[in-house]
Image (tube, grey):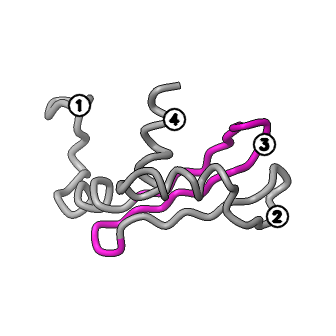
Amino acid sequence: EIRPRDWSSDVCSSDLEKIIYEYSLDVDIEREGEKVRAVIKYNQYDGYDVHFTDPTGHPIDKPEWADKMEEDNEDPLGYQLEELLSND
């Protein structure tokens, strides 16, 4: 939680827009016995972009469980992964 009294004087509204409207998460996920790293990027104009790597950082195809998540739900995969992580 950020309260106005916690803000430093060098934070301006344009900085807050960048924080709110664009971000990237790099997380390790273990699901259905598979360990992967997901890089979830979001910006207000393009929405979510998700890339997967193996634990050593080599790019891999989207795991089957991620395909199923997309098929079973109309929310973007990046949003679903964020929800999954926030519930852990």
Task: Check disc 1 and report its element: helix, strand or loop.
Answer: helix
Task: Check disc 3 and report its element: helix, strand or loop.
Answer: strand
Query: What is the C-alpha distance between the residues marked 1 and 4?
Result: 27 Å
7 sits to left or right of 29: left
Q: Label 2 sits on what residue type?
A: His
Residue at numbered disc 4 = 85
Residue at numbered disc 2 = 58
Q: Label 3 sits on what residue type?
A: Glu
Q: Position of residue 32 (x, y in %)?
A: 72, 37
Residue at numbered disc 1 = 6
Task: Check disc 2 and report its element: helix, strand or loop.
Answer: loop
Ranked by sequence position, the earlier of labels 2 and 1 is 1
Q: Label 4 sits on what residue type?
A: Leu
Query: What is the C-alpha distance between the residues marked 4 and 3?
Result: 16 Å
Tag in front: 2 or 1: 2
Q: Label 1 sits on what residue type?
A: Asp
Task: Specify start and end residues of the magenta stretch as a single range.
Answer: 23-46
- Does the CB distance between marks 3 and 2 fall below 8 Å? no
